Amino acid sequence: MIMTPHKSFILYFKKFLFNNKILFASLCLFFFSHIGLTLYIPQLFQKFIDGVSGGLGTKSILVIALFYLAFVFFVEVLNTFRNFFMQKLSWSLTKALRSDMLKNLLQLDMGFYHNNPIGELVECVEGDILILSNNISTFVLDVISNIIILLGILIIVFLNSVLLGCIFVICSVISIIMMLRQSKKDTSSLETVRKNMAEVNALVTESITGREELHSLNAKDKILANSDGLHDTSFKNEKKFYRLFTLTMMLSQAITFIEKSCLVVLLFYLLKDAKLSLGQTFMLYNYFVLLEWPLEMLAQNATTFQGLGARINRVFKLYIEKPHISFGNKTLDDKTYSVEFKNVSFAYDERDLILDNLSFKINAGDHCALQGRTGSGKSTLVKLLLKLYEPQSGEILLNGVPVNEFSQKSLAENIGYVSQSIVLFYASIRDNIRMFDESISDEQIKEALKKSGMYEKIMALPGGLDYICEDGAANFSGGETQLLACARLFLKQSKIIILDESTAKLDNTEQEKIQLAFNELIENKTAIIIAHRTETLEKTNVKFLLENGKLSQGEKAELSEGGANETN
């Protein structure tokens, strides 16, 4: 069965309600009690009016009045509890959906992110899910509530007067048709506004992420001009939407005024001809006033449904997105591993090959220096080994076993990567080093920091391990962030280490610390080092030079003159 976004949403929502059945049952209890009392209160009012006009005893009238006031009070109490449980259900749905969405996004391969702007993904996870969660539970219950109230009112009116019942039905149909026709225009305009909001959010996200590049390239004015243009477009579309929305409300009020005027005249003649009692007249008028709410809400529900339908499609299109990379269930149990690329070809766009029929083997325990110009395929080779992408042809082997046969968890635990761009999360140093694994003790973290040469630096920060990286890696130099990444790998005890040397100019002390940390990290392990410095070649026993996705292999002297000089 093909899983569409809407089918996926229905299954997800059913599962969510089942997992929160006590909360949902509590909501339904208050919800339907509120509907029942809302429909019954006008009948109490009829009894009160007829009792007063018909000479009923003072005591009986007082009892009816007290019941009426008590029911009005309980309706408000039930409404408060209903809103509380509805809000709680929305919060639970938001939390569950964001968590499940983030879990799915983190499993997707890099090819997905290559084709989807980060700003739009953030808008979907943050904006669409929030609006969807806040509205979907209330939407379902509102539709049920409004239909029940509408049918209940029509039945009660028909029981009192067939003529008025027919008039109520005609008024209801006219109101719904007029509002639905207008709401279609509102929905189209609203979708344009939401699209503009997504574009603005994407620009803001990307501008903040790339603020250093914008500053260095003096491109702030151009970005601001672009932002002003997007905001102007958004403002124009918002004005158009609110004009249409105001027109819808005015149309609704005009229809209601005409219907009320006709109803008052008709009720007057029915009362005059003694076909209705005074109490029935007031009751039926109250029901007509009460009828306005479900009619307006059903029209808004139709508009909301179209908007929610678009959001459901966006959110659950991402939710059902599956990675195109396959994994097995084997684990990396050996102490060391050989790495072999066998006839591997890869292209990001499936046209221009980055790696072209690449074959090489690094024996277990060997340290390989990988060199090449920018764009030669060094980083791509690493991404394939980390299984962030799948090659178009060929295979990658670890100890002769295809990498596809190993589990994702085992590969992540046993292949360690120190890149040039280290991410430090908005969290404590402790959690950044142990990657939120609470089973790792402070003593283990401190030992890893000592091995990486960052112990004194971290302990000198306010709070030490509790120091919060509020601005990511901004408070650390490029070399220091690489040392922190080394500390992470000392805790992981990975069996295959990949190091991407920093191309930045480092002072001698920092360079020495990095070299010592690298040496200890790769000891007795298979290592691939993307080398940017000639001295690195001195400490490796295998050297490869990548040129246009193909491999050249040579002695130390050749590569230090050819490859290292080119990359530096």
Image: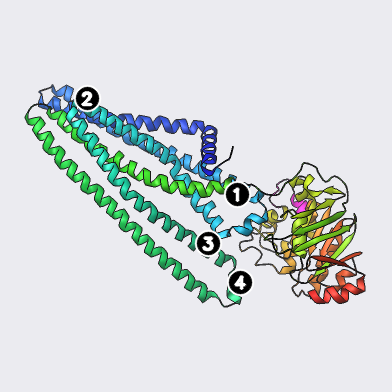
Depth order, front residue of 81/551: 551
Q: CA distance from mark 4 to mark 1?
A: 27 Å
Does residue 5 show up?
yes
Question: Relative to 120, is 248 on the left or the right?
Answer: left
- Which mark's residue is nearer the viewer, 1 or 2? 2
N-terminal of the two: label 1 or label 2?
1
- Which mark's residue is nearer the viewer, 4 or 1? 1
On the image, the x and y values in percent for residue 560 come to 87, 74
Mark 4 residue type:
Glu
Give the magenta part as a residue range: 435-445
Mark 1 residue type:
Leu
Q: Residue at x 30, y 46 (%)?
A: 179
Q: CA distance from mark 1 to mark 3?
A: 18 Å
Vertical comparison of 9 with 193: above or below: above
Q: Residues within 10 Å of mark 1 (few under 14, many from 20)?
A: some
N-terminal of the two: label 4 or label 2?
2
On the image, the x and y values in percent for residue 400 come to 87, 49
Q: CA distance from mark 1 to mark 2?
A: 54 Å
Can you identify the residue that label 4 sits on? 212
Q: Main secondary structure of the magenta part?
A: loop
Q: CA distance from mark 3 to mark 2?
A: 57 Å
What sort of colour scheme is used for the picture?
rainbow
SS state under label 3: helix
Residue 162 lies in what quarter of the image? top left
Can you identify the residue that label 2 sits on? 159
Quadrant of the frame with the N terminus = top right
Can you identify the residue that label 1 sits on? 102
N-terminal of the two: label 1 or label 3?
1
